[in-house]
Amino acid sequence: IAAAALTGVEGFATQRPASFVRQTALSMSTAADVDTKAALLTAANEARGLAMDSIRAAHSGHMGLPLGAAEIGASLYGSQMSYNPQDPQWINRDRFILSAGHGSMFLYSWLNLAGFDLPMEELKNFRQHHSMTPGHPEFPNSEHNTPGIESTTGPLGQGVANAVGLAASEKMAEARYNTADHKIFDHSIFVLAGDGCFQEGVSAEAACFAAHEKLDNLIVLYDANEVTLDKMAEYTQSEDVLKRYEAYGWEVYDIDGHDLDVVEETIAAAKASKNGKPKFIKCNTIIGKGMEETEGTNAAHGEAGVPYVDKAKANIGLPEGEGWYVSEGTREFFAGVQAKNEAVYDKWVETYDAWKEANPELAAELEDAVADNVMPADEMIKEIAQMEDANEATRVSGYKVIQEIAKLVPHYISGSADLHGSTRNYIDEGGNFGAGFDKSYAGKNLYFGIREHAMGSIMNGFAYHGLFKVSGSTFLVFVDYLRPTVRVASLAELNRVSYILTHDSIGVGEDGPTHQPVETVSGLRVIPNLDVYRPGDAEETVAAYVHSVTRKEGPVALILSRQGMDQNSAMDYMERREGALKGGYVAKKETEDLDLIILATGSEVQHALAAAADLPGARVVSMPCMEVFERQSDEYKDSVLPPDCTKRIAIEAGVTGLWYKYASKIVGVDRFGFSAPGDTVMKELGMSAENLAAEIAAMN
């Protein structure tokens, strides 16, 4: 393997793909080119040294990728990417995502060398508590705030799919904000990924979407080192990944990832090519390059090379006995890189200022989008007219509400995994996003196809890009297809993301248990930092949608019904909205001394109200969102659920476990459903006012 890598491109493929582009002008050497190449190669070896020292100090980490992909990092950060370490949030910067997040010391080393505010002391604290260098890259959040990290990665394949979302967001920004006179968005999205990323199905789903929508601003660099953790890659894969991506519709390249000249020219060619095809560069590399005891084997993947660090550093020319070494020459070189990037940045600022002066309303909209400025929830609920007093499904109510949300929040967009007609989240007059047919990149409605996992990752990518608020829909039971992305959105605190999950229970009916979620709502409720709203009528649906676009700390899941439900019209509509914004509230107050509390959510609120109608001492509490309710003051929670009233019963068309926090008796569904009309399934499994009344009567 090592010998083949040193022979150049031809050592890996007998025939270059027809789409390989070679720009001879870039191959011509000048004195300046020679100096730059020498500086980049030196930086590559010093980045290798930083990774080795940090992983050795931590006694933990993944050494293979930082050593094997160093020339790629040198080209990206030292030559090909446009960025400004002094303004790491610059909206027109090129983005880099390390999809193979286990190789995080690759990213931390290059951020330090490139001049980002990531001090060497933080590299020395790799994987330590409260450091800026966690084991896998984490998008800035309340736990870590490392500049230059564009995506939380680690689960393989996610970064590739996130990058598709960033590329789509950039295309949308171009279409919405660029004008004939001023171009303020024209950046590229880069992602470095390994064999594991391309074995994971989510990357394939997202790659199909990227090609179909012609996202030619996306460049994937495949660190093709022929290694996975357990074995050499050939043990578990035999497909030609390059041909697979070519079949998807990508422009593909096959290169020696250690030949800096070829890496430079190929990335430059890919970045310049605007032919409607995303770019896929297979970079044939040697994992753990420079550490002869492990290089080219699966042992190089992790920290197995730690005992050989000193020898490896000496072999690549680093000073003996000096840890975390960066030469003055490398610092000077990157100071020059920063100066060049700052010149580009300064010119862009001039363009932006001229654009802003010429387009004040558009500029205000963009700046609100960047800052995620929206009116407070208590004001937004007043901007939406009272809903109709009719029996209807909350997915139908949601369709009415989302139209108002789209008007109140101009940077709000939505999409569906081929279920717009059922989930009812299409934004009227919003246009459709993409290429071809009736689509444009300015469209507010995304068609993800039957690709739920990619949808979740692409939505996260939109959030990472930092301009738009995005919601995506599917049937609730299929949220398990995108659950890994919901988890990452929650831990990354992506408040720009929300989920519209309809057909919420056994009320789905005829489609049967494969489509009737019983455990799914509770399964979402246990994800930290995810607010899960299951509204009980149209007015609660208004509050749920408003919360989904005004929350600042993380994502929101909206659980909406297929089955119709009665409105709680005995209570003022605004009081219902205000109560729902608090997660739980008194939906019907007792008329005599309180002796029973009935808790309910979603379509079961109507049953609780009906069962309590003839019980003067009964209080009904609607709890559309447990998480929001738990964040209220103790005083408020006690006013809704007085501690001295211990006779409590809860009802929900789902598993019962989480409700025991609030009640001693639960009427729920701790089994799978069956195929029959929805009303029949509900009645047979106890979801009715009559059964609830009987259960109450049986209580001591």
Image: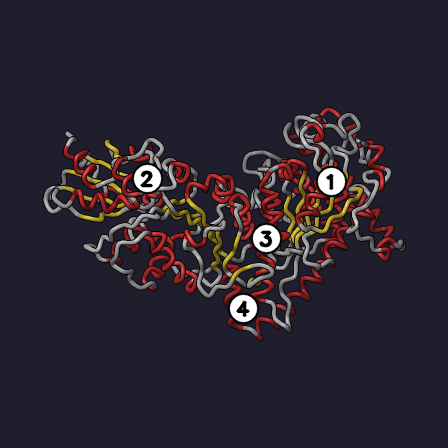
Alpha-carbon span between mark 1 and mark 2 = 57 Å
Image quadrant where one finds the C terminus:
top left
The residue under label 3 is 166
Q: Residue at x 81, y 45 (%)?
A: 16
Q: Secondary structure at mark 1?
A: loop
Q: Residue 363: which disc?
A: 4
Alpha-carbon span between mark 3 and mark 2 = 43 Å
Q: Position of residue 491 (x, y in %)?
A: 49, 41
Residue 620 falls left or right of residue 485: left
Q: Position of residue 62 (x, y in %)?
A: 66, 32
Labels 4 & 3 near each other (Cβ < 8 A): no
Q: Indicate which disc, 4 or 2, sits on the residue closer to the N terminus.
A: 4
Q: Position of residue 72 (x, y in %)?
A: 74, 44
Alpha-carbon span between mark 3 and mark 1 = 23 Å
Labels 4 & 1 near each other (Cβ < 8 A): no
Q: Residue 550: which disc?
A: none
Q: Secondary structure at mark 4?
A: helix
**For discs 4 and 2, the disc positioned in front in the rendered view:** 2
What kind of residue is marked 1?
Answer: Ala
Q: Secondary structure at mark 2?
A: loop
**For discs 4 and 3, the disc positioned in front in the rendered view:** 3
